[in-house]
Image (cartoon, rainbow, N blue to C red):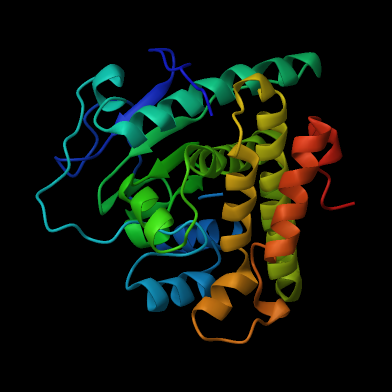
Amino acid sequence: MRLDDSDNSIDVEDQRGSGGPSFGGGGGGGLPFALLAMIGSRFGIGGVIVVVIGMALFGGLGNLVGGGQQSAIGPQQSGNSVTESCNVNAFSRENCNALASLNKTWAPIFQQSSAEFAPPKLVFYARSGNSGCGAAQSAMGPFYCPPDRGIYIDTDFFNEMDKQMGAGGDFARAYVMAHEYGHHIQNLTGLSAKVQSAQQRDPSRANQMSVKLELQADCYAGVWAALNKDRIEPGDVEEGMRAAHQIGDDALMRAAGRRPVEQAFTHGSSEQRMQWLHKGLEAGDPAQCDTFA
């Protein structure tokens, strides 16, 4: 996917290298409960059950969009400015370009509906870091933290996504970012808070509602891609669909040697994730992403 949108207008925080934020608004210590709630309901930044399965399968890789394993080399480089952080490596540049594109795509949509829009921040970390939801760890994979409106990414994850999950490609990586951005949209609209309240009132339906949130985030990722179809290259859609398939709950459970149990799904099956990503791509309209209907 041809993306070259990155500029200094995006909000980037870099926790690589020093083990803490080098600039931007940092996330606080947070509570373990907040962290677990985030894992259970987040694009992605997955469900606690799938986190355990993913860690067992990949030795710490993580859940649906898991994190990178510990590297034998020293701490990753960090940047002291947006430009430096976005150019630490190729994955950093891709993430920054995707974030800028997502901001430019979603801001007008909110303006058209007279709704207030605020862009999220992108937080890079290596192995571990801090977020407004608590500790950030590579095994969690990319995730979104509602309290500080941050998308947290350890770029080592993308290597594992390719090698361990067979879901490589620039569009597949952009899909991950766009999915987590979808959770930001849900946070801005108040849907995330409503779902969390409903989950607390009726824990027996918590997983079911989590699946609906995740599938909507997949659909929102497709909407973003549809509204930037002039940037899409041959093979991109196939990369995205393959990634959506590989991170389905049933696919991960089978890969872990377990029988898929629908009641334990937190993100949706491979078929569901592909279906809703495709729906967003076809519709190009967030109004068509009502997974709760």
- The image shows residue 183 at horizontal and vertical percentages of 61, 43
- Look at 57% across and 41% down and name the residue there: 175
Q: How many marks?
A: 0
- The image shows residue 14 at horizontal and vertical percentages of 27, 33
Compare residues 104 and 258 and report the one nearer the observer: 258
- The image shows residue 44 at horizontal and vertical percentages of 52, 50
Q: Is residue 46 visible?
A: yes
- Look at 61% across and 28% down and name the residue there: 232
Compare residues 125 and 236 and report the one nearer the observer: 236
- Look at 16% across and 36% down and name the residue there: 77
- The image shows residue 201 at horizontal and vertical percentages of 74, 66
- Horizontal relation, residue 16 to residue 93: left or right: left
- Look at 41% across and 43% down and name the residue there: 152
- Horizontal relation, residue 226 to residue 39: left or right: right
| Quadrant containing the N terminus in the rendered view | top right
Q: Residue furthest right?
A: 293
- Horizontal relation, residue 141 to residue 117: left or right: left
Q: Residue furthest left?
A: 74
Q: In terms of image quadrants, where is residue 61?
A: bottom left
Q: Is residue 60 above or below residue 42?
A: below
Q: Is residue 148 visible?
A: no
